[in-house]
Image: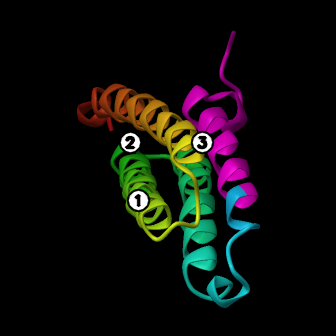
Amino acid sequence: MSIQTYKDLNCWKEAHLLVLSIYKITSSFPQSELFALTSQMRRAAVSITSNIAEGFTRNGYKEKLQFYYISKGSLIEIDNQLLISRDIGYITADKFNKINESIITVHKLLNGFIRETRKYINND
C-alpha cells in the first residue's frame, strides 16, 4: 500500500483513535474541569494528530521532523495528564490502563516514524 496522505500513516491512525478515547473519557470529567484538565487534554490530543498531518505536508525533512517532535511532546503531555486524571479519581484504573496502552502504541509508532524520517535529512 502506498502512502498518499497523512491519513495513510499508521502513527496518525493510532493517534486518531487516542484522540477519540481522550474526548470520550474527558466527557465524564466534572464540569469544573471543562476549562482546565478537560480542555488541556483535548488540545494536547488533537495536537498529536494535527502535527503529524502538518509535518507530512512539509517539503523538507528537517521541517517535517520539527512537527513530528512537537507531536511527540503533545503525546507526553497526554501521558502526564492521564496520570493526573487517574490519581485524582477522574478515571478508573481499567480506563487508565486501556488508554495508556494506546499511548505506548502511538509512542512506538511515532518514534519509528521519526527514526525513518531522520534517515532522509542528509538528502534535503
Q: Is residue 58 rendered magenta in the image?
A: no
**Few, some or many residues within 10 Å of mark 2 (<14, 14–19, 20+):** some
User: What numbered label is drawn on residue 119?
Assistant: none
Magenta range: 1-24
Task: Tell me what residue is drawn at x 33 percent, y 48 percent.
Answer: 62
| Three-letter amino acid code of the residue under disc 1 | Leu
| Three-letter amino acid code of the residue under disc 2 | Tyr
**Left or right: 73 with respect to 18?**
left
**Few, some or many residues within 10 Å of mark 3 (<14, 14–19, 20+):** many
| Between 18 and 85, the one nearer to me in the picture | 85
Check the image and report above or below for 9 versus 34.
Answer: above
Q: Where is residue 90 in the image (x, y as percent from the top left)?
A: 58, 66
| Three-letter amino acid code of the residue under disc 3 | Ala
Q: Which of pointers 2 and 3 indicates the residue nearer the eye?
A: 3
SS at mark 3?
helix
Give the alpha-carbon distance from disc 2 to disc 3, as whole Å.
Answer: 21 Å
Q: Which of pointers 3 and 1 indicates the residue nearer the eye?
A: 1
- What kind of secondary structure does the magenta stretch mostly adopt? helix
Sequence-earlier tag: 3 or 1: 3
Give the alpha-carbon distance from disc 2 to disc 1, as whole Å.
Answer: 33 Å
Question: Which residue bears the numbered disc 1?
Answer: 83
Give the alpha-carbon distance from disc 3 to disc 1, as whole Å.
Answer: 18 Å
Contact, mark 3 vs mark 1 (Cβ under 8 Å): no
**Left or right: 105 with respect to 121?**
right
Question: Which residue bears the numbered disc 3?
Answer: 15
Residue 11 placement: quadrant: top right
**Left or right: 107 with respect to 43?**
left
Outermost top residue = 1
